[in-house]
Image (cartoon, rainbow, N blue to C red):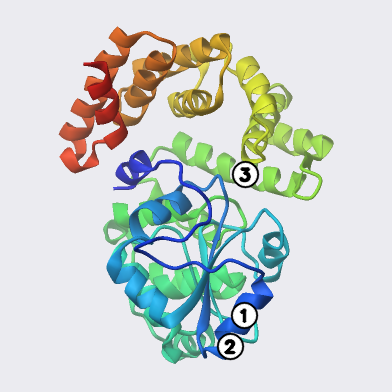
Amino acid sequence: MIKKLLYAATLVAGSFLFGQGVKFEEGKFSEILTKAKKENKLVFIDAYTSWCAPCKLMVKNIFPLQSVSDYYNTHFISAKIDMEKGEGIQLAKKYKVNSYPTYLFIDGNGEVIHRGLGYFEEKDFIQLAKDADDPNKKLAVLKKKFEKGEKSPEFLNNLASLADSYGDKELAVNALRRYFETKQGKDFTEKDFNFILFNTKTTDAPTYIIFQERKDDILQYISEEEYNKSNNRFKLNTISKKSYNQDTKLFDEKYFLSEVGKIVGNAEAEKYLQKEKAEKALKNKDFATYEKISLDLYKDPSKEDSGELAMAAWNFYEKATDKFSLERATLWAQEAVNKGEDPMNTGTLANLYNKIGDKKNAKIWAEKSIEIATKQYGKEAVDPDMIKLLDSLK
């Protein structure tokens, strides 16, 4: 399902009004608060970033829905705010927004009374809004319920997510521990394993503690080597986060290389640093720097991860104009496909062949992308842009 959604994502403008959809106000945050207070409504904030894929999916798939807009437009004064621009930077600090998309429900006094995180399907997104109007769904009330011994899995899962988004890590961890305490041995399912892995990005995440505590259960689904790789990834993500200054947009290279070197060795640490610099450059819309670093990083694509190659190839397809860069990106996409075909990397390869003028190969790989998507996920998962590309090549 996640792969379907990510494959369907397309670039969408960051902030605008929908003709038929959630109405997002423009203007300063203080003005939006004043309007909400005057109309006796809560403020709904879609806290997003320009690089966030789930944010774009919400814009494309959920915000335009009639059922969603009917509820949100009736009950809230809504606004979309880029947390990395303008007053969004200070709002992100004030409301402890560090994952995207985050949804804030704020009263007229500027206090957060409810929040959510990540991609939501239609019914769940409407329920999130209803929960904001329900005093029994507020964190303080839920905490009291937890302290009285509530053990419902759904309740504990929701409480852990909500507590984490509010910055109450201790409560989040305790809720997760209670959630998993009945899941021992065979009762620990693949769904539980995926839940931990999906929600753990850094060692600061509440689920990371569970990841460590439930290692034996997790090893039912992955090898010790894969477990250690995941553990290292969480540590590396944490180091990257701590070493990067959001204001100056620079890394503390000495700290980064020293700490990463302890995990992967000094030789690999420099490569990790370059990858992090490339990622940040892309997020900061500095494609020239991203392009230069990537061309150096992926000189030998046969040694690289297929997912990394496919992502770099797509980024070049979208933004590169230099013929050499586009031809290199085509080689990356081809190598990614060689390592395992999926709708995403075959589609990227088709687009790149088309962009460099090789219509024959563009047609071959567009057909392949559509075929794989249909077989794996059904016709509804086929990228409409791939159909348009194929039609243009006939």
Q: Do labels 2 and 1 touch, CB within 8 Å?
A: yes
Question: Which circle, 3 or 2, is nearer the viewer?
Answer: 2
Q: Residue at x 41, y 88 (%)?
A: 134
Query: x, y (%) of residue 365?
Result: 28, 17
Q: Is residue 51 above or below residue 112?
A: above
Type of amino acid at the residue the image marks with label 3: Asn
Which residue occupies 52% across, 54% down?
A: 212
Q: Is residue 87 above or below residue 29?
A: above
- Tell me what residue is drawn at x 61 percent, y 16 percent: 295
Mark 1: which amino acid? Leu
Q: Residue beneath label 1, please? A: 33
Left or right: 198 as drawn, with respect to 312:
left
Most extreme residue toward the front, as rendered? 19
Position above or below: 236 against 136 = above
Mark 3 or mark 2, earlier in chain: 2
Secondary structure beneath disc 2? helix
The three-letter code of the residue at mark 2 reads Lys
The residue that label 3 is drawn on is: 237
Asked if residue 249 shows in the view, the reply is yes
Location of residue 346 by image quarter: top left
Classify 10 Å Cα crowding around label 1: few (below 14), some (14-19), many (20 and above). Answer: many
- Label 2: how many residues lie within 10 Å, few (<14), some (14-19) or many (20+)? some
- Residue position for label 2: 37
- Does residue 378 appear in this view? no
